[in-house]
Amino acid sequence: MNSHSLPLFLTVGLLSACTVGPDYHGAPAVAPKTMAAGRLPHTDKTSSSEPGVAQWWQSLGDPQLNELISQAMQNSPDITIAQARLRQSRASLSGASADLMPKISGDAAMLKLRSPDTSALGGDSDGGGRGPLTQYLAGFDASWEADLFGGTRRAIEAAQSEAESSQARLADTQVQLAAEIVQTYADLRDQQARLALVDASVDIEEQALDLTRQRRSRGVASQLQLEQVLTQAENTRAQRLPLQASIVESVDHLGLLSGLEPGELDARLDPPRPLPSIPSQTPFADPAAILKARPDIRVAERALASSNAQVGEKQADWFPKLSLTGDLSFSAGDPGHLARKDNATWLLLPRLTWNILDFGRVAASVEGAEAGRDEALAQYKSVVLSALRDADVALARYGHQRENVVMLRNVESSAVRAADLTRQRYRAGTASTLDWLDAERTRYQAQESRISGDAALLKDFASLHKSLGLGWTL
């Protein structure tokens, strides 16, 4: 580098340290009163180390459910889509980062030329023309645009935020998928348990129907009593078909979530299993702190950061742009002589361009970027407020459902005892068939309500973790 070019490169270096546009200082605080009021922590304060919030479903102790979720995390089309988008955003970041570096290209060519015979035109010629003439060419071109006012750096900052946003979207997809699998699995086990309950009730009502027919044949029971028992048995039996259809639907939906074809899970999930047991304590200590890491909030925050960087990227268009173009080429008649100094030609061209009069085009693009940033800010606030509401509702619903399940189990115990006593009285002849069937119907309804309550509690447990954004690993 000679003494004349040194001031130029020093000036470029100093100007490149300048970055126009607003710097990002993080997202603003949203709903600070709610956070300070401590409305969220409705749950028991326990350690978050076991089983951990990343795989919260393992606390349910169901190996089959764990296997389904693990398989879904690997094969789900939604996960594959999110992973592909993450790779795309990272590739865009690499491309934006490369814009800071020079562009260098090389070329080589061989030129073979023969001049025409000009003797027919009266010129001096030996009659055979001239040539052929062979020339070898090789060269390198380089160009670089100095990032004087940080437009490229702002573009890299925006691309970095977009890549981080895509990563958060992948985490959010994992959160949604895990919760949906647990909820669908709860539906399946609920439907299978209620189907078994229907079959048991049908057996009891068939026994009552046989006894009533015998009593009718002896003239002890009336035709009305027989029809009443028959109607109840048919009504109970009619509940099997909808439950069977719902079971098929749930199994197929679990297959879809796991990236499997319809029918692949039939053999594995067909045997009924009890609903997983809910842990007595929640596996996290501070819901308000965990909520801040919720992936969809992270997505919105990174979108805000990207929009803020885009404002500076557009503002850089107001200022001059400096580019440097260089060319080094060699030519010779013999390829072995290409590298000789005498055969070299070089060119260095600094170029300064400034779009002085653009009739408001840059101002319009800056205004559009600022509007996009304001939209991203409003979207971030909306996502945070929705997340706070979801978490508060999920925590309250889960707590109330736990209390409701306790009451449903008490009701079930009472109904089972009443049905047993009525059956004993019926066999002793002190209770009628209708009394027995009424007690059995009450028992059936109580057991069905308890099973549905247990399933609802499990689904609320999944909704609670989903509302806090738990269940992702990257």
Image (spheres, helix red, strand yellow):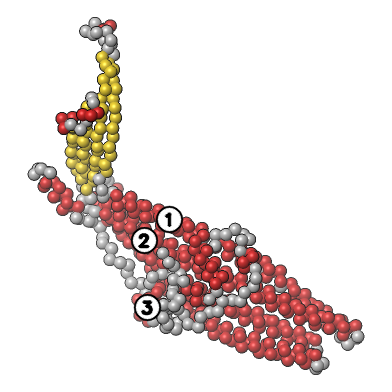
Q: Earlier in the sequence, mark 1 or mark 3?
A: 3
Q: Determine if residue 125 is in view.
A: yes
Report helix, strand or loop for mark 2: helix
Distance between the alpha carbons at the discs numbered 2 and 3: 26 Å
The residue at which mark 2 appears reads as 164
- Say which mark, if any, is on residue 35: 3
Percent position of residue 33, x then y: 36, 78
- Circle 2 or circle 3, nearest the eye: 2
Residue at (37, 52) in percent of width and height: 91
* Quadrant of the frame with the N terminus: top left
Distance between the alpha carbons at the discs numbered 1 and 3: 33 Å
The residue at which mark 1 appears reads as 85
- Sort mark 2 into few (<14), some (14-19) or many (20+) by Cα contacts within 10 Å: many
Residue at (38, 64) in percent of width and height: 300
Q: Are marks 2 and 3 in contact (CB under 8 Å)?
A: no
Percent position of residue 315, x then y: 26, 53
- Circle 1 or circle 3, nearest the eye: 1
